[in-house]
Image (spheres, rainbow, N blue to C red):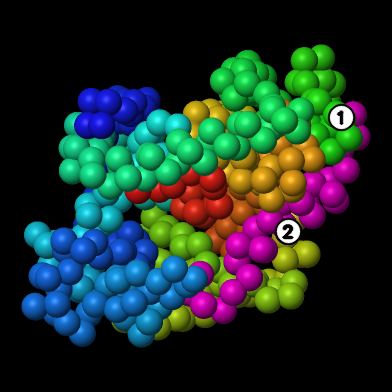
Amino acid sequence: MSVADYEVDYSDVIGKKVECPPQCGMCCLCQPEVLPEERPFFRNNHPDCLVKSKGPEPYFALALKKGHGSCVFLENRRCKVYENRTSYCRQFPYHLYASDRVKVELDLSCRGVWYGTGADALTEAKGLVARADRRILAALEESKAVYKEFYSICREAGVMSDPSRLRMTVSENLSMFTDLSYLSRIMDMSQIEPVMSLSGLQPDSRPDMESLEEAGRDLAMDSMSSNDPLSVPVYCDSQWNWNMFMAADDRIQWSVMNDDGDLDVKGSANASDIRLKVPDEAGRKVLADYVMTLNGRDSFMGSVFSLMDANAYEDDMANAYYGCMSVTVMDLLWRMSMLDHFMGTGCGADGVREAIIFYDMDRLDAPTIGAFI
């Protein structure tokens, strides 16, 4: 099999431009794997900067300042080994996802994706795919087998739906996923209907705001429940500060990490004191665009499949997909409310956009049955 023998979906990057803002450096907070062919350079020139990563399947990676800050090669937000940076550094903010095909996805936590300036994303993506051909072939062989087995189990369990049909239905009913009255009903129906349909679904006339708030808060708090800066989502704000929110019990602490890896506490709040807010019309438009992005991502579908597997195939694929999309939106809206509480980002187009920048890297890190390459 060669590069011409497998399908690559570039739809997420067509017509887009991406730049790397020199003040940012947020991607340098992600500890990159060092591939075997890249290790000699670091072993010969910077042996103290090559470490084994943490986790159940450790790999060689670049060291971080104080074990949790930015990459040791980042100085004044510039890379000291830029010409020899790793393949994973070169790929960001592009993600190559293998399922039963390959799809290129953009990480919207990168502020450089939002400006509409810089390099042509399609050209860059094609170059990255060509350079990763050998890794893609190996990953795709495994991921295709996993997907084939997953679909077989779903058919046997009677929970199979057509994924393309699910996507089309979300696209046709997009406004439902930006309206709290509909979100409330979708979340309820996904739990009680044997096979859920959006056709004819009526909004909840009196949505339970407390339950919606709780759903969004629980999801957000779960991702922030760590005292290790390496394990919590990072929000790079418009002033290029690296913001980190760490949760313990019901309390959230907001800190800013400096370039040396030190944390400066900026504030704290009880999570239960942060009220769920609703985006205005302009904010809902930005939210709708993001739902469409999620709806087109193979990694999002793979994440839904992973949840189905974890739940022993008890839910129909339609219920799992619509339910997961709904709780994802609730997570995002609660984070929007949290950012506004701490930083006054608002609930309009800018506020929703900032929430996406805060959230999307976390979304792309969700467990999936496929593989990021």
- The numbered mark at residue 88 is none
Magenta span has 162? no
Which residue sits at x=80%, y=34%? Answer: 190
Residue 314 x %, y % = 79, 40
Q: Is residue 188 above or below residue 210?
A: above
Q: Nearer the viewer, residue 193 or 71?
A: 193
Amino acid found under the numbered disc labelled 1: Glu
Residue 75 x %, y % = 20, 73
Residue 247 x %, y % = 64, 72
Label 1 element class:
loop
Residue 304 x %, y % = 62, 40
Which residue sits at x=32%, y=45%? Answer: 138
Q: CA distance from mark 2 to mark 1?
A: 23 Å
**Which of marks 1 and 2 precedes in the sequence?**
1
Q: Which residue is mark 1?
A: 193
Residue 83's quadrant in the figure?
Answer: bottom left
Q: Is residue 119 above or below residue 31?
A: above
In the image, taking residue 13 as reference, residue 37 lies left or right, namely: left
Label 2 element class:
helix
Amino acid found under the numbered disc labelled 2: Asp
On-image quarter of the N terminus: top left
Q: Nearer the viewer, residue 348 or 63?
A: 63
Q: Is residue 279 visible?
A: no
Tell me the crowding category of disc 2: few under 14, some 14 to 19, or many 20 or more residues within 10 angstroms, Cα based: some
Which residue sits at x=57%, y=37%? Answer: 149
Instruction: Look at the image and give the residue range highlighted in magenta.
Output: 205-231
Which residue sits at x=30%, y=64%? Answer: 33
Residue 246's quadrant in the figure?
Answer: bottom right
Main SS class of the magenta portion in the image: helix
Q: Which residue is mark 2?
A: 218
